[in-house]
Image: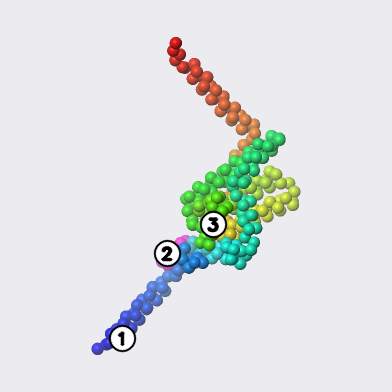
Amino acid sequence: MSSPTSRRNSWRGSRASSECHVRRRGSSCSYFSSSGTQTEDFSVSLSQPIFTITLRFLLAIDLWLSKRLGVCAWEESPWGSIRPLVRLVEFSGHAIPWLISTVYSLLRGESVAEKEIMLNLALALILDVLLVRVVNTLVRRRRPAQNRSDILSAFFVERYSFPSGHASRAAMCARFFLAQLVDTASMRVLVVGWAVLVSLSRLLLARHYVADVGFGLAMGYCHYSLVERLWVTWDCLQDLLLIGLSERLNRAYSGIWMVDWKY
């Protein structure tokens, strides 16, 4: 007759063997934040389709690489001393300063060609913001766990992570400038370097994942192609404004004659 102690040991042994059998059937990859709380869980089972396994594997690499690149996320980070400089680069890619400066240049433009370029740049910025916001709302990917909110990031809020609006804006503006304004090799290097630094700042500050920045760059590159196809000339804008004004005047004029005058 077996003792209670031996029965407990045998039960624990059977439980451990069953757990080991379950673990052999699949593998898991979890991403933990610095505080130790689990933020992403990518459980992989060999019974899942190959597409699902590949996607989870790529997402796990994306999380791991993004965490390694976030060296300026905190002041205590390995490169925390250059965080103010990286935040300055980040600010150069915000949408609101770009929109304000573009509208100011449009109003202060001296020639029709300058006004036309600034007009299309303003429309391109608005289009870029809207399309990025649509994709953000559809995907709703959370930001990295080590992302730290500060005054600028709270004021210029971007709720979701995928895709990176800064990367999309940088790629679109860089291609716009290269095609419309820049004509020297040194300026081309400067524009491309700025776009690369803005995109890299999102990773160093742990604002986005690597996939967010890569997809944002691709979106921005395609946005300029759409803007170039829908390019609005200054004469076309004037014609549209005149047509709209004439239609309003005609409606107002016809409304005056349709009034039932009473004496």
Q: Which residues are magenta?
A: 42-52
Identify the residue shown where x is 50% and y is 47%.
134
Q: Is residue 83 above or below residue 175?
A: below
Q: Amino acid at mark 1?
A: Ser
- The quarter of the image holding the C terminus is top left
Which of the two labelled residues, at mark 1 and mark 3, occupies the earlier sequence position? 1
Label 3 sits on a secondary structure element that is loop
Side of 49 where 130 appears, left or right: right
Please state the horizontal and vertical placement of residue 119, each as a whole percent of the image: 63, 38
Label 2 sits on a secondary structure element that is loop
Specify the label residue 6 is tagged with.
1
Identify the residue shown where x is 59% and y is 41%.
123
Q: Please give the residue where the numbered disc 2 appears in the rendered image.
A: 48
- The answer to which image quadrant residue 208 occupies is bottom right
Q: CA distance from mark 2 to mark 3?
A: 37 Å
Q: CA distance from mark 2 to mark 1?
A: 40 Å
Which of the two labelled residues, at mark 2 and mark 1, occupies the earlier sequence position? 1
Which of the two labelled residues, at mark 2 and mark 3, occupies the earlier sequence position? 2
Q: Amino acid at mark 2?
A: Gln
- The quarter of the image holding the N terminus is bottom left
Identify the residue shown where x is 65% and y is 46%.
176
Identify the residue shown where x is 61% and y is 54%.
90
Q: Nearer the viewer, mark 2 or mark 3?
A: 3
